[in-house]
Image (cartoon, rainbow, N blue to C red):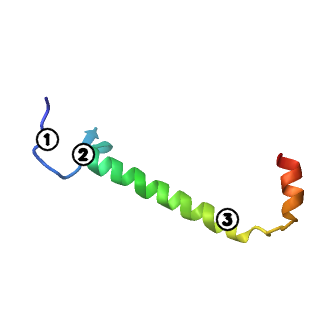
Amino acid sequence: MTKILSKEPQYILTEGKPTAVILSIHDYKELLEKVEDIYDLKELRRMKRMKLEFRPFEEFIKENA
């Protein structure tokens, strides 16, 4: 089993330039959640701009029965 001695991200360099990062699984999952939250907020803002259309409930029932 590999142990990481540092809790900070570890950078992989290629020819002296950063090309990859090693994160703890906890930090990786946290990052994914933040990205998902940003996407969700963007989608909610888009939906708020959409025009709402209402129709009778009975019409909905007929179409989806």
Label pair 1/2, CB-CB below 8 angstroms: yes
Disc 3 from disc 1: Cα separation:
42 Å
Nearest the eye: 47 or 6: 47
Q: Does residue 40 appear to the left or right of 18 in the view shown?
A: right
Q: Residue at 79% of width from left, 69% of height from top? A: 52
Q: Amino acid at mark 3?
A: Arg
Q: Is residue 41 left or right of residue 4?
A: right
Which amino acid does the dot numbered 1 rest on? Ile
* For marks 3 and 2 on the same chain, the one whose residue lies earlier in the sequence: 2
Dot 1, how many residues are within 10 Å of its Cα: few (below 14), some (14-19), or many (20+)?
few
**Left or right of residue 50: residue 20:** left
Q: Position of residue 17 (x, y in %)?
A: 30, 45
* Rendered location of residue 60, percent (x, y): 85, 56
Kind of residue at badge 2: Ser
Viewer-closest of 41 and 54: 54
Q: In the depicted view, which residue is nearer to us: 37 or 55? A: 55
Circle 3 packing at 10 Å, graded few (<14), some (14-19), many (20+), is few
User: Residue 46 got which mark?
Assistant: 3
User: 2 above or below 52?
Assistant: above
Residue that mark 2 sits on: 24
Asked if residue 34 lies left or right of residue 64, the reply is: left
Q: Secondary structure at mark 2?
A: loop
Viewer-side label of 3, 1: 3
Residue 15: x, y in percent?
28, 38
| Numbered marks: total | 3
